[in-house]
Image: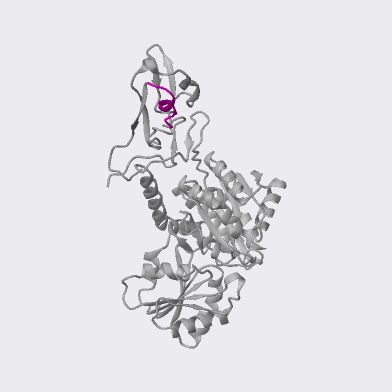
Amino acid sequence: MNKVLITGSEAAALGAKLAKIEVLSYYPITPAFPAMERLSKYIDDGELNCKFIRAESDHSALAAVLGGSLAGARSYTVTNSQGLLLMTEVVYHVAGLRQPIVMGVANRALSAPHSRFPEHGDVVSQSASGWIQLFCENNQDILDNTIQAFRIAEELRVPVMVNYEGYLQSHTLEEVFVPEQSKVDAFLPLKRQPALDINNPRGVNTVTSPDFYPYYKFNQNEAMLESLNLIPKVAAEYNQEFGANSCGLIECYQMEDAEHAIVAMGSIVGTARILVDNLRKEGRKIGLIKVKVWRPFPVKAILEALQNVSFVTVLDKNIVFGVGGALATDLKAAAYGRGEMVINGAILGLGGGKCGVEEINAAVMETESAGSDKNKSVWIGL
Amino acid sequence: MALKQLPIVPSGDPGGLAESANAGVQRINRPVISDATKIDPIVILFCPDGAISLDESGFVISYKFCKGCGICAKESEGIVMVPEYTGPKGIF
């Protein structure tokens, strides 16, 4: 296994290259752009045999990728924020048509007011779209999750978004272990499942009556739920093959005797580990749960991890207006009827706001002092 | 629960949008020939391709291609529109 110093964008591009993607379409947007730049270079240098379709918008880009996938090609794209919103119609098409497309999303805050900085608001808007959503703590996660995403997507025929934050991850160099191509080939055998066949023409996405529509949605939901069984198996196999340390649905850190748990996803997890270490030195029984899979929401795994916990601080880099942070809301719904556990959410890091150890510490303190008012979200850094 | 056997990718046969298993019926009313002798042949030109044709036995309506617009019944005698759905009201 080769060790390199690369940005998150390069890790995403490298993951797609190792997966030997065959169709790529993209419309330039910051901060997702460098991933596509790197993939274009792989193609230009002859390192990747892939059809690159330049599109006039993000909507067309995902539509082109969808066409490639319907024809049976392994297809990939990258976008973020406004581009993802423009794609939204096709995002739902892809999921409903059960196409195993993988998309890197370099999470960025949404307009208005305009922002170019990291936040999870863009993918939270796609929470009901039927895409599996994986979150990455660091650049190693981006590479590992991108490779695993193709396996998960193709096995279940459910599309996967691999989320990493703009700039904080997309433009930041980190050490990444790169698996060997031959081993990735064995891990990711290309399973062609074309929906289009020129010898047997059919129309996709036909008008569907109420007699059939709910059945399609039921099957889609079943496949999503099945991914909760598959993802940990794929991660375990990946770890075994590549000597990696990729978690399944969630990862528990210092949770053995924890009474207070921090639950978070994305880049903030790495910083929260430092805070947990600091608070442990002061004798606090605190732990951390890293949520890798947010859609579908791994209810069982998280509740098991929280079995002996009495207080939870949820860190959300997003806000669902009038409700609270998306992760906190999901966790509260999951924990319904689970007795005395208090779950308080903290909103921080919106539009690129600082999420250092200090801010996370403030989130822990302020959610604690908010007591058991479960409808309250604490805003950090205002 | 008995699940209907459906393709994984929602899809239909070519030209089969109206009546294929995946599509269901798009029409609210369907045209029915009441008196073939009174039909004005102009409907053949006006209808979507294949929706109505003339063979040895007379005019034949294909419910695979007919969209149920009702123009034929309005413009020509010998065709009446009949509701596709006769169940409880308020669904369509």
Q: Quadrant of the N terminus of chain A?
A: bottom right
Residue A85 percent across, percent down from the top left: 56, 56
User: Going 48% across and 70% down the picture, which residue do you hit?
Assistant: A325
Magenta segment boundaries in residue numbering: B69-77
User: Going 62% across and 66% down the picture, which residue do you hit?
Assistant: A169
Residue B11 percent across, percent down from the top left: 44, 38
Question: Does any portion of residue B39 appear in the rendered image?
Answer: yes
User: In the displayed structure, would residue A309 be above or below residue A141?
Assistant: below
Question: Does any portion of residue A20 appear in the rendered image?
Answer: no
User: Going 33% across and 34% down the picture, which residue do you hit?
Assistant: B84
Closer to the camera in the image, A77 or A11: A77
Q: Does A215 sit left or right of A17 as displayed?
A: left
Q: Does A154 sit left or right of A334 as displayed?
A: right
Q: Does A275 sit left or right of A117 as displayed?
A: left
Q: Quadrant of the C terminus of chain A?
A: bottom right
Closer to the camera in the image, A2 or A264: A264
Q: Which quarter of the picture shows residue A78?
A: bottom right
Residue B72 percent across, percent down from the top left: 43, 26
User: Going 54% across and 75% down the picture, which residue do you hit?
Assistant: A348
Closer to the camera in the image, A272 or B69: B69
User: In the displayed structure, would residue A101 be above or below residue A201?
Assistant: below
